[in-house]
Image (cartoon, helix red, strand yellow):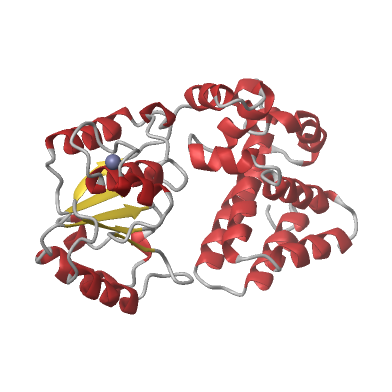
Amino acid sequence: MSMNWDEIVGHQDAVSIVKAMLSTDKIPHALLFAGPAGIGKRLLADRLAAGILCSNDGEKPCGQCHSCLLFGRKAHPDFTQVAPDGVSIKIDQIRLLKNVAALTPAVGAGRVCLIEDAELMTVQAANSLLKLLEEPPPGLIFILIAGTSKPLLPTILSRCRKVAFHPLSATMLEQALVDKGYPPAAAAIAARLSGGRMGKALTLLAPEGLVSRDMALQLLASIQQVDMSGVWEQTTKLAGLETKKIVTVLEFFLYLLRDLLVVAGQYGQQLLYNIDCVQELADLVPAWPESRSMAAVTAVKNTIRAIEGNANTRLALEELLINLKDWPEKGE
Ligand SMILES: [Zn+2]
């Protein structure tokens, strides 16, 4: 694996904390990497895990030793990973960690357990983990990675050393993407739409990356059509996706509504997220006065909440689109 720290863009504070921990060999029993999804928490957590496991004496992780090579091949026997099974991390998954905790290191330098999306632990799972954190097995380091969608139990928080991650500025992210070799125009769009999150920006720059955004744009356009067929077509298409993807499309829909406000208010293109859709947005502006866009933002946010709260997806989407289409008859 590459050991170039420069590939971690931004997050200077988090990087210096991790570097200091590795160089002084003072690693807390439990760490929490907290911040929005797709921001670079996993990249740094992996670097820290490799460093803890590295068996060389110099700068860790060295990238050369047996341990580092195993880690790079995702085959390190002293590295355990837990991720959500479906929508949550279940108690059985945490119970299995007790068996892991009872083992001694196979390679030698220590052991690391990484819990991804830790905020998705069920209360039972979190309480089970708490017992492990309260009496940490010697030589086993827990790294919890948590997004911002749900809070962690305060009892878990109090047992972890927190390392906070914040979004990068669009300019910094754009430059980093250009440095990675992406075309400047694409980098500019991805940097803005990703909300300062490198992982999200890279997803957007992947060949199919803008599919969700384009679906949101089609959705917006279908609302303007005279008959309902476009709306039904879009609803069917959307409702067939996984919940996470539906929410992503609706989030892009919010960005488009926000951009409509920017275009309508003539605030200038530097404030636009979807800078490649200026013409499409400008064409829609006459039909979307500020009051309509604002009402739509509220309606979309409510729909996201309903869908995340396990409402019937299809019904929630139909209700949203009918409401948006009926405006202003219902809205005013
Ligand atoms: Zn090493």
Q: Residue at x 17, y 62 (%)?
A: 155
Q: Residue at x 9, y 66 (%)?
A: 135
Position above or below: 263 against 211:
above
Taking the view exactly as shown, the residue that stands out farthest to the bottom is: 92
Foreground pick, 8 / 54:
54
Foreground pick, 136 / 3:
3
* Residue 18 horizontal/vertical position (percent): 24, 37
Q: From this viewpoint, is residue 266 visible?
A: no
Q: Residue at x 70, y 67 (%)?
A: 239
Q: Number of labelled discs?
A: 0
Foreground pick, 302 / 126:
126
* Residue 314 horizontal/vertical position (percent): 68, 71
Q: Is residue 53 left or right of residue 273?
A: left
Q: Quadrant of the N terminus?
A: top left
Ligand 1 quarter of the rendering: top left
Q: From this viewpoint, is residue 147 visible?
A: yes
Q: Is residue 103 left or right of residue 183?
A: left
Taking the view exactly as shown, the residue that stands out farthest to the front is: 66
Q: Residue at x 17, y 38 (%)?
A: 21
* Residue 20 horizontal/vertical position (percent): 18, 33
Q: Is residue 213 left or right of residue 304?
A: right
Q: Residue 293: which quarter of the image?
A: top right
